Image: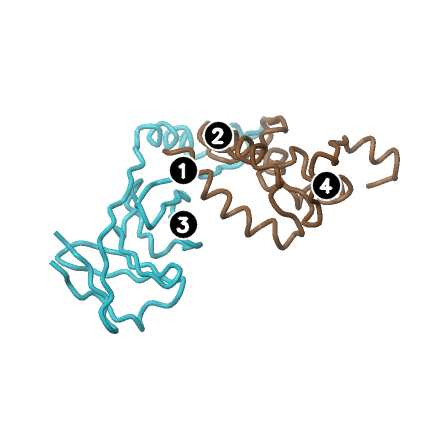
Chain colours: A cyan, B brown
Amino acid sequence: MLVEVAKTIELAPGGVKAVKVNEKEILLCNYDGNVYAVDRRCGHMNAPLDFGALEGRYLTCPMHSVQLDITTGEALNLPLYHYFGEETEDEPRTKIIDNYPEHVGALFSHIKTCNIQTYPVKVEGDSIKIDIQ
Amino acid sequence: MDIESRKKALRYMFQKVIEPLGYKFSPDEELVNFLLEQEVLLEQKHRIPYCPCQGLTKKRSEDMKIVCPCIPFHRKHFDMMKRCWCGLYVHRDVTNPDELKQIPLYRLKRAKNVS
């Protein structure tokens, strides 16, 4: 079922726009004059991808820099860990917030980075419609 | 994670960085494909696409200087060789990358007194 989600004037070239349809959060991306629709949430930790950066067809998550291909929804790399500074003799890692980096690192290793869903898009006149099942 | 897709993405991203620096991907496609693949494998291991031809030191401040494309951190050295250390990038006026040699910095320093 095609649903109008935005007007073409709302989506600048190379830009993104988050919309909500039927409780689903969708991200519209304008790449090379074509409109693509993908899940708004990253397949790693649900971060809102509209806060990220779109370079060509590659969308970078603002949280852990996972890059996603907006044409396929494929996650291209693993998330980048936060950097907590070098471990020194004066300040060993274990002293930093109750061993927080190790704790986060252990959690991260159990979080899978999933591909995101893409949705068929149709542009009719000045209207952007997407097909949501 | 598909290696070929990631190679394409890295190629696209790196292109945007190296072009303003006066470099381009080596015309040797086989070499470029091989090196990008190694970078993807390094990225899968360390989360960062380090240069496949330089050793990691385990010291972050040093290791960050060999994140591909590492041209800005070794500009004088690479400009003199007209290529980056592993040959993934060459100066934009280079047509035959086989003519370019990998010359260690200490030799260049000795020869031309480069700082």
Q: Residues within 10 Å of mark 2 (few under 14, many from 20)?
A: few
Residue placed most toward the observer, A66 or B81: B81
Q: Which residue occupies 67% across, 43% down?
A: B90
**Image side of residue B18 versus residue A12, left or right:** right
Residue placed most toward the observer, A124 or A58: A124
Q: Chain of mark 2?
A: B
Label placed on residue B78:
4
Residue at which label 3 appears? A58
Q: CA distance from mark 1 to mark 3?
A: 11 Å
Who comes first in sequence, dot 1 or dot 3?
Answer: 3
Q: Quadrant of residue B26?
A: top right
Label placed on residue A77:
1
When the figure is inspected, residue B85 is found, relative to residue B75, above or below; the finding is above
Screen quadrant of the C terminus of chain B:
top right
* SS of the residue under disc 2: helix
Residue at which label 2 appears? B46
Q: Residues within 10 Å of mark 1 (few under 14, many from 20)?
A: many
